[in-house]
Image (spheres, rainbow, N blue to C red):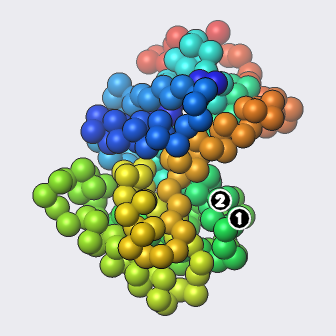
Amino acid sequence: MRIHVINPNTTASMTDKIGACASRVAAGNTQIHISQPDSGPVSIESHFDEAISAVGVLEEIRRGEAMGMDAYIIACFGDPGLLAARELTRAPVIGIAEAGFHLATLVSTRFSVVTTLQRTAIIAEHLLDQYGFRDHCRRVRATDLPVLELENPAGNAYQALLEECRQAKDDDGIGAIVLGCGGMADLTERLTLDLGMPVIEGVSAAVKLAESLVSLGLGTSKHGDLAFPRPKPFVGRFADWGE
Ligand code: 2AL
């Protein structure tokens, strides 16, 4: 089974970290193929960043289709381009936010999300509404860490994250925490031990969900709105995307 994990931002160290976390949880017969867009923002922290990076995600899906990938993971917590990506393939496409939300509901009745900047917390709230997880999530908490602070070995990202997770555990009336950034994937085990409650990060969650769907022979439905886009001419810089 070949799973194409796409880091939608263009920071290579984060792409490597996400790939390592995906490989660590993958089954013995699963190959992880990791990539990032050729162009786009170094981190995704706004609607604008998401819109630009979604195009990069779709380019990576097109490349993955040429390579015959069995499943795709969009490894940014805003799940940029998720539904458009599903239109381009019969393979399952899983966003790390939705993967984290789904697994959290299987191990707890209520969870909180701990993410980076306050403005991305609002984006996560939109996803909870869109995906129908609003009643399961008690609170989306921001650490005010910019995404790339998670890549700074000299910074105090771990302590800031741990502190916010502790407050969530003490005050939110929850049973689990979902980490709200792909760049937090490598901190999960340490946080789980330090907090003594389930901490879920979406990259690992998405790999195991993708493996399950592929094993069950389940792919993206082509009946309805996720059917392949209707062929039509595209002009300008997207001319080669059309027919
Ligand atoms: C993210 C993420 O997962 N990667 C990125 O660049 N921005 N999302 C977030 N909420 O910080």
Whether residue 87 is visible here, answered yes or no, is no
x, y percent for residue 157:
25, 64
Q: Is residue 105 above or below residue 242?
A: below
Q: Is residue 69 above or below residue 198?
A: above
Between 158 and 190, the one nearer to me in the picture: 190
Q: Residues within 10 Å of mark 1 (few under 14, many from 20)?
A: few
Secondary element under disc 1, as helix, strand or loop, is helix
Quadrant (top left, top right, bottom left, bottom right) of the N terminus: top right
Which residue sits at x=57%, y=30%?
Answer: 28
Which residue sits at x=68%, y=16%?
Answer: 232
Q: Residues within 10 Å of mark 2 (few under 14, many from 20)?
A: some
Q: Amino acid at mark 2?
A: Leu
Residue, disc 2: 103
x, y percent for residue 214:
73, 32
Quadrant (top left, top right, bottom left, bottom right) of the C terminus: top right
x, y percent for residue 102:
67, 58
Secondary element under disc 2, as helix, strand or loop, is helix
Using residue 159 as the reference point, say whether residue 194 is left or right of it.
right
In the image, is the residue at mark 1 within 8 Å of ligand 1 by its beta carbon?
Answer: no
Which residue sits at x=34%, y=29%?
Answer: 39
x, y percent for residue 113:
50, 69
Labelled disc at residue 106: 1
